[in-house]
């Protein structure tokens, strides 16, 4: 038999098959990487488009959502594992290739998808979006990754805890080292607490509804969808997994909304803080996008008080208008800069400033934020946070109360800001916020309050209440 007859004929070229679920997940990850988009804003329209095109059912949407959020949450861990399987620094690997590898790593190490299916689906995706040449590279790397499970890989790529605790936790729990350090400082030490917090940051948060008082009730919402009671807020309900809040009539009409329970507690604490004197004029000085303002406006209406909702950015002010539309009591929405306010000093009885911040308290909802933020970002927020709190204290009358809130537990955005403003301005004192969150455990020594995902099931909201005394 001749050499030519023994040689096998080449395989015919097979066109790669497009998997709509993985294509959508890849598209979402590229938007997050290329445009600094947020997955919670990018993913819903992509899913809606896929459903309308008939490409997706409910299970497909659930898988695509898990692939996107799971990959983003564990990105740091997966990057360390991929780095151990390639022969060059990760910065020399094209970002689209890294996205395909991270998606494949998550399927292999973070889901129950069988190994052969995870590898073949990822390679097929690579053929579609990267080409056959780079698909071979993806195949080789993923086959190396598939040789061990997540626990074994972490043991290989993470430095020992005893040698470098912060770097160990950063790799194991997929957070930048500086974030681990900052959160640890805020917690006050102890390995168990920081590990519980970092792990909670990597869990999918529940969808929490708020029944705006006087406009809806928890009973109405419970009748409309499968829910569990809220843990702490009397207006909260937790939706069953897979529930669609936009399908609920009260949410469509703005009588109810989606709002983390920590955010509800901040508004309730300010509304219930004891006052000296009248209680008729309330201000939300950083009102966008409108969740706290809507709850405050509903509470104010029950007492015959009026809310002024101020937001610097006009497009966010429009979101506030939408959130407050139909409120039964008097309210007004304006676009104004809270550091150069149009209102006169001493105009309000209650003032809330939920200031712009790093967002380190909402990493469950925006996992990509942990990779975008840098320590130097805090320096940029600091003057704004101090300016907003200083003007809030000027805006409230003597005897009135100011609530300073952030969705960050970083000490540079919480206690340090409050202490600094109190020292510089004078004429104000801290009010113990803990009694205003009845039933909520583990609130610390006070008088301010820090909520935590691992202790309270909420975002890591911070609240300090200040009463103007002069």
Image (cartoon, rainbow, N blue to C red):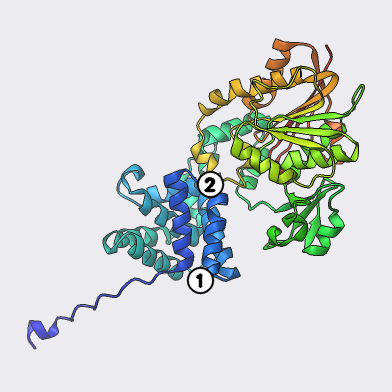
Whether residue 264 is situated above or below residue 46 in the rendered picture: above
**Residue shown at 33% from the left, 49% from the top:** 94
Q: Residues within 10 Å of mark 2 (few under 14, many from 20)?
A: some
Q: In the picture provided, is 7 more to the left or to the right than 300?
A: left
SS under mark 1: loop
Whether residue 225 is situated above or below residue 12 in the rendered picture: above
Earlier along the polypeptide chain: callout 1 or callout 2? Answer: 2
**Residue shown at 82% from the left, 37% from the top:** 330
Q: Quadrant of the C terminus?
A: top right
Q: Mark 2 highlights which residue?
A: 38
Asked if the residue at tag 2 contacts the one at tag 1, i.e. Cβ–Cβ closer than 8 Å, the answer is: no
Q: In the picture provided, is 316 more to the left or to the right than 443?
A: left
Residue 202 picture location, percent across and down: 60, 48
Q: In the picture provided, is 463 more to the left or to the right than 32?
A: right
- Residue 348 visible in the current orientation: yes
**Residue shown at 52% from the left, 44% from the top:** 368
Whether residue 396 is situated above or below residue 6 in the rendered picture: above
**Residue shown at 71% from the left, 35% from the top:** 333
Q: Residue furthest left?
A: 2
- Residue 155 visible in the current orientation: no
Q: Mark 1 highlights which residue?
A: 55
Q: Residues within 10 Å of mark 1 (few under 14, many from 20)?
A: some
Measured Cα–Cα span from mark 1 to mark 2: 23 Å
Residue 300 picture location, percent across and down: 85, 37
SS under mark 2: loop
> Considering depth in this image, is 179 or 296 the residue closer to the camera?
296
Q: Quadrant of the N terminus?
A: bottom left
Q: Residue furthest right?
A: 277
All told, the count of numbered labels is 2
Image quadrant where residue 394 sits: top right
Residue 468 picture location, percent across and down: 82, 17
């Amino acid at each position: 038999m001749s050499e030519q007859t023994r040689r096998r004929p080449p395989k015919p070229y097979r066109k790669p098959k497009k998997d709509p679920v993985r294509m959508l997940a890849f598209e979402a990850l590229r938007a997050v990487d290329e445009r600094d988009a947020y997955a919670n804003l990018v993913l819903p329209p992509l899913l809606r488009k896929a459903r309308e095109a008939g490409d997706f059912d409910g299970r497909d949407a659930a898988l695509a959502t898990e692939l996107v959020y799971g990959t983003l949450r564990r990105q740091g861990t997966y990057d360390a594992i991929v780095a151990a399987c390639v022969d060059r620094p990760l910065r020399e690997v094209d970002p689209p290739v890294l996205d395909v590898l991270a998606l494949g790593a998550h399927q292999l190490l973070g889901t129950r998808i069988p190994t052969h299916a995870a590898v073949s689906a990822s390679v097929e995706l690579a053929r579609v979006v990267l080409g056959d040449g780079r698909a071979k590279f993806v195949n080789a790397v993923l086959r190396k990754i598939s040789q061990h499970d997540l626990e074994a890989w972490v043991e290989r790529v993470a430095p020992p805890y005893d040698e470098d605790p912060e770097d160990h936790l950063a790799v194991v729990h997929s957070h930048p080292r500086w974030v681990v350090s900052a959160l640890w400082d805020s917690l006050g030490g102890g390995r168990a607490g920081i590990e519980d917090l970092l792990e909670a940051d990597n869990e999918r948060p529940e969808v929490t509804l708020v029944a705006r008082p006087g406009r809806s009730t928890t009973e109405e919402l419970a009748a409309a969808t499968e829910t569990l009671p809220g843990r702490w807020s009397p207006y909260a309900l937790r939706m069953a997994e897979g529930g669609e809040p936009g399908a609920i009539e009260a949410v469509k009409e703005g009588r109810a909304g989606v709002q983390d329970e920590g955010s509800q507690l901040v508004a309730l604490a300010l509304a219930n803080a004891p006052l000296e004197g009248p209680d008729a004029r309330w201000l939300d000085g950083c009102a966008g996008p409108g969740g706290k303002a809507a709850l405050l406006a509903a509470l104010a209406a029950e007492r015959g008080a009026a809310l002024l909702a101020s937001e610097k950015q006009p497009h966010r002010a429009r979101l506030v208008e939408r959130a407050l539309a139909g409120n039964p009591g008097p309210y007004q929405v304006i676009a104004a800069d809270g550091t150069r306010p149009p209102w006169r000093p001493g105009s309000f009885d209650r003032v809330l400033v939920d200031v712009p911040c790093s967002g380190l308290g909402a990493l469950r909802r925006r996992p990509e934020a942990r990779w975008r933020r840098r320590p130097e970002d805090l320096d940029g927020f600091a003057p704004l946070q101090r300016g907003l709190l200083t003007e809030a204290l000027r805006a409230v009358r003597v005897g009135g109360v100011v609530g300073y809130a952030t969705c960050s537990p970083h000490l540079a955005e919480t206690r340090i800001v409050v202490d600094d403003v109190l020292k510089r301005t004078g004429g104000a004192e801290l009010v113990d916020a803990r009694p205003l969150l009845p039933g909520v455990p583990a609130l610390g020594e006070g008088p301010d309050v820090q909520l935590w995902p691992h202790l309270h099931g909420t975002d890591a909201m911070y609240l300090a209440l200040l009463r103007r005394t002069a």
